[in-house]
Image (cartoon, coloured by chain):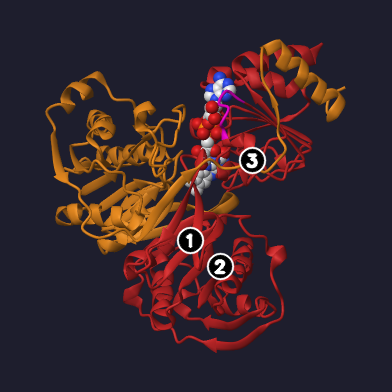
Amino acid sequence: MKIAVLTKAIPSYESSIRIDSTSKWIDESVVNFVVNESDSYALEEALQIKEKLDNGTEVVVVTMGSQDNTSKVLKDGLAKGADRAIFIQNEDSYTDPLSIAKLFSENLKDENFDLIFSGLQSDDLGSGQTGVLLGELLGMSTATLGIETDIQDGQIKIKRELESGWFQWVTLPFPASISIQSGINEPRYPSLKGIMGAKRKESKVVDGQLSDSPKQNFLNLFIPKTEKATEKIEGDVDGIVAKLMDILKNKLRVVS
Amino acid sequence: MILVVLENQRGNIHAFSKEAVAAGQSLSSKLGMDLSVLCMGENASTLKEQASDYKLQNLILADHDMTSTYSADGYSKVLSDVIKDLSPKYVIMGHSYMVRDFLPRVSAKLDIPFVSDIISVTYDGDSPVFARQVFNAKLATNIQSDSSSKTTLLSFQSAAFSSDNIELGGSDATTVFEVSINSDDIKSTSEPEFQESASGVDLTTADVIVSVGRGIESQDNIPMVESLTEAMGAELGSSRPVVDMGWLPSYRQIGSSGQAVSPNLYFSVGVSGAIQHVVGMKGSKNIIAINKDEEAPIFEIADYAVVGDLMEIVPKLTEELKK
Ligand SMILES: Cc1cc2nc3c(=O)[nH]c(=O)nc-3n(C[C@H](O)[C@H](O)[C@H](O)COP(=O)(O)OP(=O)(O)OC[C@H]3O[C@@H](n4cnc5c(N)ncnc54)[C@H](O)[C@@H]3O)c2cc1C
């Protein structure tokens, strides 16, 4: 069986996010790029399936983006146990989900993957569409928000998360593209042996230029406005604590 | 024409779909376009009855045995056929988990854009501009669909429009769309929806909730917030990553996939304020948030924004409370 895992480099949550001079993108020079959280869970799920089946299953990590931002992502995937990597390189930041999915589709269609796993959304653009779009473009069955998987003969059973504590099991025939929800497993750390071995694994680079014009365009980024009258409390710790005590006791009266 | 598609939620119109109707009415009056509402899939005819009061031009029923339970295959096929037939300029739904699951399929099938999780609409002349959150709600972006797109799919974040603003008055016409679908179109099989036994704590009745996020950094620091919770006589809640990492049990999770709470005081420590968390707590009467990042989105909805290091503030505050 062949499993692809789509994984993306995104700014870490501690990174400071500044709009750049074009106002269409962020200043990447002050950003620390890391693997998108739900993608780590997607990779772990694929690796666990490989280990369980133990019958020549191949796991391929796939990423798209610029060389600088993504190199860590691929190294990390290979070090954790993926067999090879495909890097769709483009130095511009694409934002149209459908154009992005088409690039994946063009570059992956000849691989004939049985399964494609992706994180349910990236914590930068957050469209949450790539895995489903790609599934449709490649004629695969699709499901989102997988929180448990069970590989069966020629098909995969997935527990889907629904709203407010509800779930549903769906069964999809191969080939299938499934987006994975965080918390499905415990992502591993790469071992030293894995890190050393990663250097010898195949990493294919393909050129990722858009062939089509985008269907939707980012006009400009902006900082969201506060809707509420928020009182800011800052300064030294003792001052903050005294102020909080006053609010809790005298304003909100939740403590006596 | 603008087409709003209703979603079923256990026999009723989904709350997000009602907001989508309000959005559809707003766009149709701004753009001078007709409004149609489509009832398809699970409980389609019940939804149609419930929608009969809404003021619109055409109420459409697209019912079929093979879509009487949800499948991404079936729903995307039917909606694509409706769009091909009616060529709406915009198709509007609420940004629900079901919409995440099947609407991108329609986008790819018809090669049309899907602008998802929209928070507001402005207009550049006659052309709507859609705002959505990016970078974990730290920034937002304005998006326009390409002018060559015949149809654009839209999904709105909860509370982007209020269902209180729905105009009533009934539909000018009711029509039936003949669904053509066969068993080859549906590759997946699904089992009935179920709820996981909600054992643990009922946070919905708590008066004060202390809620802990990933800023707590490690399981070893959990006792520190537990002490604060105790000193405040509160219940402990958390964001999703804290549960995902196994630091707290899942019944403590607040948000779209956890519990929805509205205590008198919501006291958050190290929570960034992602929308999926915020939908579960924005009804709180008072919100105090501690975060070291001055630009954390949680501060946008907080009454008191405490900018500082929780590792220092929490133990000191606990000490004071115990005095
Ligand atoms: C479909 C879907 C469903 C989801 N359901 C839920 C849900 O039900 N509930 C939920 O919570 N999330 C849910 N999420 C995840 C959600 O999008 C966010 O990823 C999550 O809420 C982030 O949790 P957090 O705020 O704890 O972590 P982060 O976003 O990582 O934020 C941590 C915060 O801690 C601050 N911090 C760090 N160190 C300190 C310090 N020393 N002192 C003070 N502050 C500090 C940082 O500045 C940061 O703001 C869902 C996501 C999806 C896509």
Q: Position of residue B109 (x, y in %)?
A: 32, 69
Q: Position of residue B120 (x, y in %)?
A: 57, 55
In the rendered image, which residue does mark 1 sit on?
Answer: B99
Q: Position of residue A219 (x, y in %)?
A: 42, 52
Instruction: Calculate the distance from the C-alpha at mark 1 to the C-alpha at mark 3.
Output: 28 Å
Q: Does residue B138 appear in the picture of this structure?
A: yes
Instruction: Calculate the distance from the C-alpha at mark 2 to the C-alpha at mark 1.
Output: 9 Å
Q: How many marks?
A: 3
> Which chain gets the orange colouring?
A
In the rendered image, which residue does mark 3 sit on?
Answer: A226
The chain ID associated with circle 3 is A
**A200 is higher (above) or lower (below) than B155:** above
Element at label 1? helix
The residue stretch that appears in magenta: B291-296
Q: Does residue A128 appear in the picture of this structure?
A: no
> Which chain gets the red colouring?
B
Q: Amino acid at mark 1?
A: Val
- To the question of a shared chain for discs 1 and 3, the answer is no
Asked if residue A212 is among those painted magenta in the image, a careful observer would answer: no
The chain ID associated with circle 2 is B
Q: Amino acid at mark 3?
A: Thr
Determine the residue positioned at 31% across, 41% down: A7
In the rendered image, which residue does mark 2 sit on?
Answer: B7
Q: Amino acid at mark 2?
A: Glu
